Image (spheres, rainbow, N blue to C red):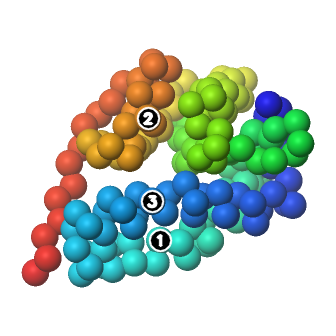
């Protein structure tokens, strides 16, 4: 597995990977849990939201970076995006996505370590990384982040259809 910087030619693959990675959460977890009204209100355009978000993730001049995990046959197995606020010496992992066929192969760990190393070289002192709090879909991400020494802060969001 090779971890490299993002290239513009990666864009469509990253959009597809993001939609494939997070689609099951929105469609199989969020929608059934909250129903159609709340789903439409909160995440009804989730795929289009990712189509708009992913192209803006990489802008090194603005402190935004993307690294891609690529197999020996040039297949994109995953990616991570992070942003840095040098004045605060703070970093945020914005998104981590690993293709289903490559999960449980330590690619998420390698991508996080890559981003953390880059932030360390850039004098970042604290990094945040987020994921879902109690659902089974996000359990692997929670386990990964905690295994890397990240400390969870539990926050609850409540939804109610009026």
User: Residue at coordinates 82% horizontally, 38% vertically from top-left?
Assistant: 71
Q: In which quarter of the image is the C terminus?
A: bottom left
- Pointer 1 residue: 46
- Gap in Å between the C-alphas at discs 2 and 3? 14 Å
In the displayed structure, 3 sits above or below 50; it is above
Q: Nearer the viewer, residue 54 or 34?
A: 34
Q: Nearer the viewer, residue 45 or 94?
A: 45
User: Residue at coordinates 50% horizontally, 57% vertically from top-left?
Assistant: 22
Residue 4 numbered tag? none
In the displayed structure, 153 sits above or below 44; it is above
User: Residue at coordinates 40% horizontally, 33% vertically from top-left?
Assistant: 142
Judge from the rendering whether residue 143 lies leftward or rightward of residue 76; answer left or right. Answer: left
- Pointer 3 residue: 24
Q: Which of marks 3 and 1 is nearer the N terminus?
A: 3
User: Is the residue under label 1 in contact with that under label 2 (CB below 8 Å)?
Assistant: no
Label 3 Cα crowd, 10 Å radius (few <14 / some 14-19 / many 20+): few
Q: Earlier in the sequence, mark 2 or mark 1?
A: 1
Judge from the rendering whether residue 128 lies leftward or rightward of residue 59; answer left or right. Answer: left
Query: Which percent across, then down, holds residue 35?
Result: 22, 74
- Gap in Å between the C-alphas at discs 2 and 1? 21 Å
Label 2 Cα crowd, 10 Å radius (few <14 / some 14-19 / many 20+): some
Q: Which of 63 and 4 is in front in this view?
A: 4
User: Residue at coordinates 68% horizontally, 49% vertically from top-left?
Assistant: 64
Label 1 Cα crowd, 10 Å radius (few <14 / some 14-19 / many 20+): some
- Residue 153 lies in quadrant: top left
Judge from the rendering whether residue 107 lies leftward or rightward of residue 42; answer left or right. Answer: right
- Pointer 2 residue: 140
Q: Residue 91, can we see it?
A: yes
Q: What element carries label 2?
A: helix
Q: In which quarter of the image is the N terminus?
A: top right
């Amino acid at each position: 597995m090779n971890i490299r910087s993002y290239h513009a030619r990666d864009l469509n693959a990253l959009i597809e990977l993001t939609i494939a990675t997070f689609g099951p959460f929105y469609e199989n977890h969020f929608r059934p849990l909250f129903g159609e009204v709340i789903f439409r209100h909160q995440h009804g355009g989730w795929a289009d939201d990712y189509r708009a978000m992913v192209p803006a993730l990489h802008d090194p001049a603005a402190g935004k970076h993307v690294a891609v995990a690529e197999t020996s046959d040039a297949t994109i197995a995953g990616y991570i995006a992070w942003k840095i606020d040098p004045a605060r010496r703070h970093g945020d992992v914005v998104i981590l996505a690993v293709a289903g066929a490559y999960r449980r192969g330590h690619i998420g760990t390698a991508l996080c370590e890559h981003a953390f190393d880059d932030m360390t070289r850039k004098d970042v002192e604290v990094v945040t990384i987020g994921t879902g709090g109690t659902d089974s879909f996000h359990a692997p991400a929670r386990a990964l982040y905690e295994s890397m020494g990240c400390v969870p802060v539990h926050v609850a969001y409540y939804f109610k259809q009026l």
